Image: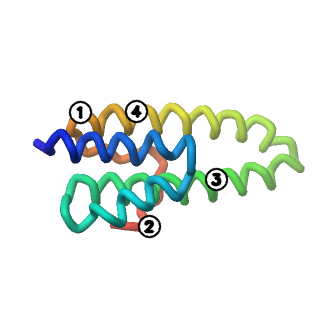
Amino acid sequence: MPSSEERTLTLLIYLLSFVSAIIGPLVIWLIKKDESDFINFHGKAYFNFFISYAIYGVIAWILVFVLIGIVLLPILGIMGFVFTILAALKSYNGEYYQIPLSIRFFS
C-alpha cells in the first residue's frame, strides 16, 4: 500500500492538471518518480492521458469542418474531466489506474 504522502502527491498530479495542464504534474512527477514506483506509475499514466486526449482533441477540432467534431469535442471534454477526477480518487485510494483510451507513450 502506498504511503499517505505518495497518495497525496498522485492526487495532486491529477488535480493540478485543472490549474496547469503540464507544469504542476510534471514538477511532481520529475521530482518524485525515482523515489516512488506509485508516483512514477501515475505520472506516466497522466502524461499518457494528456498526450492521447490532446491528439484526440486536435482530430476532433479538424473534424468540426465536417460537423462530426461538433459532437466529439464536448464528449471528449466531459470524458477528460470525468476520467481525471476518477483517476485522482483511485490514486488517492492507493489503486493503480489506467485512464481509458490512453495511448501508452510512456510504459
Could you tell me how far apart the alpha carbons at marks 3 and 1 are, in whole angstroms? 29 Å
Q: Marks 4 and 2, Cα distance to the nearest angstrom?
A: 21 Å
Amino acid on which disc 3 is placed? Tyr
Q: Which residue is mark 1?
A: 93
Residue identifier under label 2: 105
Q: Is residue 54 left or right of residue 84?
A: right
Mark 3 and 1 residues: CB-CB less than 8 Å, in contact? no
Residue at image mark 4: 86
Say which label, 3 or 1, has the lower sequence index.
Answer: 3
Discs 2, 1 touching: Cβ within 8 Å: no
Discs 1, 4 touching: Cβ within 8 Å: no
Label 2 or label 1, whichever comes before in sequence order = 1
Q: Which type of secondary structure does the marked residue at label 3 adopt?
A: helix
N-term-proximal mark, 1 vs 4: 4
How far is disc 3 from disc 4 in space, using C-alphas?
19 Å
The three-letter code of the residue at mark 1 reads Asn
Q: Nearer the viewer, residue 93 or 71?
A: 93
Quick one: 90 or 8, which is closer to the camera?
Answer: 8
Label 4 crowd bin: few (<14), some (14–19), many (20+), radius 10 Å: some
Instruction: Using the numbered discs, state the Cα–Cα distance from disc 1 to disc 4 in whole angstroms.
Output: 11 Å
Q: Is disc 3 surrounded by few (<14), some (14 to 19) or many (20+) residues within 10 Å?
A: some
Q: Position of residue 36 (x, y in %)?
A: 19, 59
* Mark nearer the N terminus (3 vs 4): 3
Q: Which callout, 2 or 1, points to the residue nearer the camera?
A: 1
